Amino acid sequence: MEWASPVFQRLTWVTALTSAVPKLETSAGDNDLTNNFCRFGGLRSWICATAIKLLAVSAATCQQPSPTPHSQSGTPTPSKPSAAEPYILVGAGDIASCKVLQGAEETARLIEQIPGEVFAAGDLAYESGSAEEFANCYDKTWGKFKNRTHPSPGNHEFGGRKAGSAYFDYWGAQAGPRGKGYYSFDLGVWHIISLNTNCAALGPDGCTADSAEEIWLRQDLAAHANSCIIAFGHHALYSSGVFKNHALHPELRPFWQDLYNAHADLMLVGHEHSYERFAPQDPHGNADPKNGIREIVVGTGGRSHDPLGFPIRNSETRNADSFGVLKLTLWPGKYSWEFIPVDAVHGFHDSGESTCHNVKPGN
């Protein structure tokens, strides 16, 4: 047994100490306090009692379960909290640039203090997602918690002809099937989906209905019909950035339609280097408080700040000058969100809570 060695070490120590008692009894004088104590058996009794306690503690301590291992696929297996504790999912997008690492260093320090799983919503290593930039920019900041991070690719890793080769080399199986970059995992009753939103780089079908990724998404959602659902990726269907070709991505509507049909709760994105939270809405931008998807843009990982244009429909709150991370606290049937800025005193804050569509809240 694995715990036998430390137990027997303690047993050997106790046995040696107990055998020394007769020698102590004969060497002490008649008026010696120790001799009188030993004569009544007090020291021997104390040693025996201590031996029992040491053996019990050794067995209990050495049989504690080891940390949860990674799955065979290489994807981190989320640790399971106790029944009374929620799951935590924290992260951002648009993270590390070797030109100025300070922002990524500051947001990394926030996440180091927060337990749970991490999402990284694309554009992780600027400017081109090269192996050198992953090693010298991302890994030195957010790489400190790589083993609990779930990434999605951005255009700086996957756009153009790059096809994410350095991205997949860095993440391995954590990034999903090589060349695809989409996958899913579970946190209790919560089903989390990482999407590759680089539609133009995915081949001629891109993100259209009946494309390879859309078919996978539809099937994945059907297999988790009784789950609360969060999706994350790099690009936003809706955001209020100044340049509309950068802020709005209607090519993602087929993905949103699948998520909406499955009663998904949240969509987390980056690309715009700002924070913006939308009211629940349908894939066509109509407010839908009952069944809509709440989109949160959190491109605040540290790269830079983008200006915001006029707020578009359903935009509830936004900020363009605070780096920070979004922390989600996930219970069965309900969740809360909190934007945690790097500057705790003067930075932008946002928080709230809601229920999920497919699971009734627990007690």
Image (cartoon, rainbow, N blue to C red):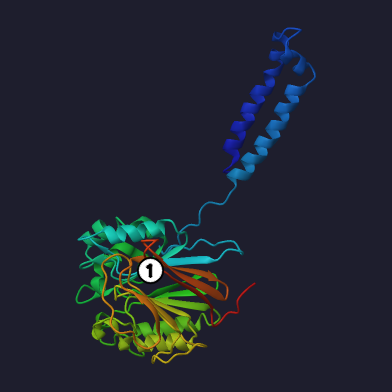
Q: Is residue 125 left or right of residue 222?
A: left
Q: Quadrant of the C terminus?
A: bottom right
Q: Is residue 346 left or right of residue 79?
A: left
Rate crowding at label 1 as few (under 14), some (14 to 19) or many (20 or more) other CA atoms within 10 Å: some
> Looking at the image, is 303 positioned above or below residue 283?
above
Q: Quadrant of residue 43?
A: top right
Which of the pair 39/349 is nearer the observer?
349
Which of the pair 21/332 is nearer the observer?
332
- Going by the picture, which residue comes out furthest to the front? 346
Q: Which residue is mark 1?
A: 348
x 48%, y 78%: residue: 229
For residue 276, say whether it is visible. Answer: no
x 42%, y 92%: residue: 286
x 46%, y 80%: residue: 220
Q: Is residue 200 left or right of residue 219?
A: left
Q: Could you say where residue 166 lies in the image, as x and y percent from the top left?
A: 25, 65
